[in-house]
Image (tube, helix red, strand yellow):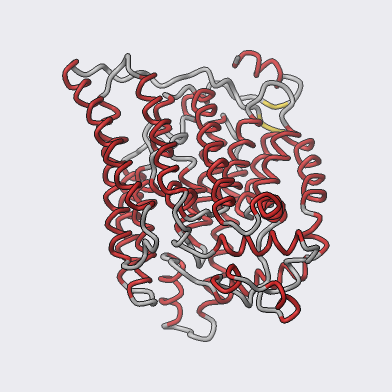
Amino acid sequence: MTDVLPPLSHSLAPPKSPPHVWAKLAWLGLLFVAVDLLALYGFLGRLLYPLNPVWVYLSIYGAVFGLYAFAAGVLLPRVGAGREKPVLLLILGGAAVFRLAVLFAPPQLSTDILLYVWDGRLINHGINPYHWAPSAQALRSLRDNTWADMEYKSYQSIYMPISQAIFAGANAVFGTNPLGFKLIYTLFDFGVIGLLLKLLKRLGRPATQIVWYAWCPLPITEVALAGHQDIVGVFFLLLAFLLAMRPGRAEAGAALALVAAALTKGFALLLLPLFARVHGRKFLIWAAVALLYLGMPLWVYLPNFLHGMNQYLVNVHANSGLFGWVDAAIDLITPRWGYWITAKLSDAAILYAVWWSVRRPVMSYPDLLHKSFVVIAVTLLVIPTLFPWYLLWTMAFVPLIGRRPLYSFVLLSGLSALLYTYYFSLMPYWWAPLLEYLPFYALLYWETRSGRETTDARDDLQHPGRVGDRRAAVYRADR
């Protein structure tokens, strides 16, 4: 038997309107903040080498993050009723121009986009990117400026089939120009904003909550500026949630979207048991078919893919936080087995999060979102590598979870820029993870201990039931 998800008919009570003069000042403050943000992003977009010197980038990022937090956390709640539409237009307009301000800048924060360009070029030449590393002598004739500037030349590709399909399509249209790839991923980012607006409406939440994602510096810098492809997986994950909330039979669409997210980045694969808990056997059948068909290139060349993934997992460890601290502690006891033990503890934590998500019925769609967020967040916090752009997967949940935003993960999205301190001297600093993670975990602990509601499931407990023939009636009642 499977679980029913009751109506989403509740909505948040609107806050009491502040005095008119303070509401007007807050509205003007939002306008000034938007102008300041545009100026800072415009300056960032004009830098040819934003990480040289790196303190310039960190200063700009810190400034835009502070303005963003001030606008979303202080000014927006004080605007008051009656200005929702103009405020939403300002938020969406700002989100667009901030991204355009950095879109045309060189993608200098990382060289990952060059790997995308290289893989797309190989595919369009009829070459298997899973089989050949860029440094392979067999590919010597294809070496160009893209090859010269990329990192990880000795690693076979670790990008999954949906990613590879987009690489090939982007290369067919834009050739080896990284700007074309950035444009595609920025369009996906706009799609994420659109899906979040639909989900906020479906959940009965104020549309202006979109500011927590739309103005967040993380997607602006890591997608529009750096061109990271994780945003594609985030888009398909949110699409899966939206399709799962459709009236009537939602299994096929939700399964296809969730599998597309998983075949962009494997994180989403961990949510298959939770979605199956909600939608039952039909969902599993559709998911299995989608995995078999959409993942065909992966299954055919699985040994090659696993070899490249093993290269990455063994050699690339950055910004691990909790994983690194546990590993260092165990190394004091048994240096030979320390990393292996830490890796197994990490796997156990992830499996426990998945089991926790399915051990009880899913009582509502807010509950589904909450449990999905916990699984992804735990995964990111216990793996040995956490690049800033991985946090795109958690930032998409920030406007959707709870009566207040997830302030701890908002803070982490800002502090994650400390990873770039590596470029001070091309070596990691011991103090960077402490400055990044200790404030985050302190705030996360406070949020948990203060009794903060991270989901509205409690509001829906009066509507338990089972999915089956009643689902259509439940959805009609929701509409």
Classify residue 159 by image quadrant: bottom right
Q: Which residue occupies 52% across, 77% down? A: 339
Decide: is 255 above or below 200. below
In front here: 169 or 460?
169
Quadrant, the N terminus: top right
Q: Position of residue 468 (x, y in %)?
A: 75, 25
Q: Position of residue 288 (x, y in %)?
A: 79, 46
Classify residue 469 by image quadrant: top right
Q: Position of residue 342 (x, y in %)?
A: 52, 72
In front here: 250 or 185?
185
Q: Which residue occupies 39% across, 41% down? A: 98
* Residue 29 in view of the camera: yes
Q: Is residue 288 left or right of residue 365?
A: right
Q: Position of residue 151 (x, y in %)?
A: 55, 72
**Number of numbered discs overlaid on the protein picture:** 0
Q: Is residue 139 left or right of residue 18?
A: right
Decide: is 210 above or below 23. below
Q: Is residue 213 left or right of residue 29?
A: right
In front here: 406 or 95?
95
In front here: 52 or 7?
52
Quadrant, the C terminus: top right
Q: Which residue occupies 52% across, 53% down? A: 227
* Residue 269 in view of the camera: no
Q: Is residue 410 left or right of residue 20?
A: right
Q: Which residue occupies 52% across, 63% down? A: 383
